[in-house]
Image (cartoon, helix red, strand yellow):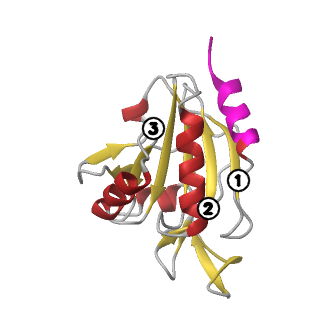
Amino acid sequence: MTLERFGIIKFKGKEATILGEDLKPGEVAPEFTVQSLEWTPFHGLADTAGKVRIISAVLSLETDVCDRETRRFNLEAAALSKDIAILVISTDLPYTQKRWCGAAGVDQVTVLSDHMSVDFGVKYAVLIKEARVLRRAVFVVDQAGKLTYVAYMPALGIEPDYAEVLDAAKAALVE
């Protein structure tokens, strides 16, 4: 049975339930399966094996803050090592994500959907039960599959500390 935690975050002004237990740096990152823009299964860690991963959980690409965050990571990706993969995950449907990426010119990050099974949402403790959307969080997973950075935003409208995330990803790279 999945742990349910109430009162950690608000959605639409009301206390909401988060499914799963928050992850911590030093823990092994859980493998998860989400959908690609083509509706094919994407195994978050296996399909990016050998890379440092920045995993950004967002509510919806259609919201201002998530739009801004995804565009920012897309810009930053161009200057990063090819050994760093950036995954942006929401519960938006893949065809909605694909349309958004095309309109936004986002092509440097991998945008993925947790709509089908919310496997990522539960394993990474970002699923808001009542709305079936993800709360904002960022994770850095090193090349060995260990979490080196974890940041759960205290409110849906708060953006991550981009410099801190990027520094953590660079520090996780094995030379």
> Element type at marker 2?
loop
Q: Residue 47: horizontal and vertical position, in percent?
A: 37, 34
Query: For residue 160, which numbered disc appears in the image?
Result: 1
Q: Is residue 69 visible?
A: yes
Query: Sequence order check: which comes first, mark 1 or mark 3?
Result: 3
Nearer to us: label 2 or label 1: 1
Query: For residue 108, which numbered disc appears in the image?
Result: 3
| Residue with the mark numbered 2 | 136
Does 51 sit left or right of 114 as displayed?
right
Report which quarter residue 25 is drawn in. Answer: top right
Q: Residue 60: horizontal and vertical position, in percent?
A: 48, 67
For label 3, the crowd category at 10 Å Cα-Cα, with few meaning under 14, some 14 to 19 and many 20 or more, is: some
Report which quarter residue 53 is drawn in. Answer: top right
**Residue drawn at 71 percent across, 64 percent down:** 158
Dot 2 amino acid type: Arg
Mostly what secondary structure, the magenta segment?
Answer: helix
Q: Residue 91: horizontal and vertical position, in percent?
A: 42, 65
Q: Is residue 60 magenta?
A: no
For label 2, the crowd category at 10 Å Cα-Cα, with few meaning under 14, some 14 to 19 and many 20 or more, is: many
Tell me if residue 175 comes above or below residue 16 in the rendering: above
Nearer to us: label 1 or label 3: 3
Distance from Cα at disc 2 to Cα at disc 1: 8 Å
Which portion, as a residue range, is magenta?
163-175
Tell me whether circle 2 and circle 1 mark residues in contact (CB < 8 Å): yes
